[in-house]
Amino acid sequence: MWRKALRALFWIAVVCGVIAGIVSLFFTTWTVPSDDPQLAVSIEPAMSAGDLVLVTRSTGASDGALVRCADPDVPGRFVVARVIGHTGDNLVFSGGTMLVNDSSPSAPSACDPATVHLRNPATQEDVELSCLLEEFAGSTHPVLRNGKTDRDVKTTVEPGKVYLVSDDRALHLDSRDFGPIAPSTCQRIVFRFWSLGGWSDAKKRLTVLW
């Protein structure tokens, strides 16, 4: 009996090893840094600092994708945001709303919870933000808004670039700050294993990220 059990365990280990090997060919893991307050607030509410996530090894950026891209201002660091525009797309940010080629992504319902409190890294003040489920490019994801923007932006994405927008539209770190970037520096974030809270944080473990 024990020989059968050992044989079964051996084959389970082999299958798991093969699966792990295949996954490692196409994906890599990454822990979101906890030492950058602006990045930390900008990726809320879908992600948080300290998350251990799965990232594609291939580069590129399709509309609506949540991506990790090389920080254009700090070598060796990354920014995380969502792809909103490609070459030639017209984008407008005004009064807390976003228009992509004259269309506004719909917000069908509020998140649970409907409000989120975050600390503004620039002022150290507590900010109350509304959380809405936004539909864009065939997927639904949560975004944070406060009903206003720091400044109005109207732009057309230049050739060969993509425009990134933080899910936190108010306390952002995106192309409104550093401009459009090359998609060749971006990799898609697809899955979260667990958060800074570890395995006990049931809400943020084993989560598909869109």
Image: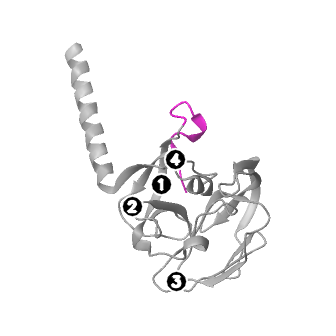
Badge 1 element? strand
Q: Which residue carries the number 4 mark? A: 34
Q: Residues within 10 Å of mark 3 (few under 14, many from 20)?
A: some
| Mark earlier in primary sequence (4, 2) | 4
- Residue 57 in the image, given as x and y percentages of width and height: 35, 59
Distance, label 3 to label 4, CA atoms, is: 32 Å
Q: Residues within 10 Å of mark 2 (few under 14, many from 20)?
A: few
- Residue 56 in the image, given as x and y percentages of width and height: 39, 58
| Mark earlier in primary sequence (3, 2) | 2
Badge 4 element? loop
Q: Residue at x 51, y 32 (%)?
A: 199
Q: Residue at x 48, y 49 (%)?
A: 33
- Residue 156 in the image, given as x and y percentages of width and height: 60, 85
Q: Residues within 10 Å of mark 4 (few under 14, many from 20)?
A: few
Q: Which residue carries the number 1 mark? A: 190
Q: Which residue carries the number 3 mark? A: 87
| Mark earlier in primary sequence (1, 4) | 4
Q: Nearer the viewer, residue 28 or 32?
A: 32
Residue 19, by quadrant, is top left
| Amino acid type, label 2 | Gly
| Amino acid type, label 3 | Thr
Which stretch did the figure color magenta?
A: 197-210
Q: Which residue carries the number 2 mark? A: 76
In the image: residue 168, left or right of residue 129: left
Note whether 151 is above or below 34 in the view shown. Answer: below
Is the C-beta separation of discs 4 and 2 under 8 Å? Answer: no
| Mark earlier in primary sequence (3, 1) | 3
Distance, label 4 to label 2, CA atoms, is: 15 Å
| Amino acid type, label 4 | Ser
Report the mark closest to the observer, 3 or 1: 3
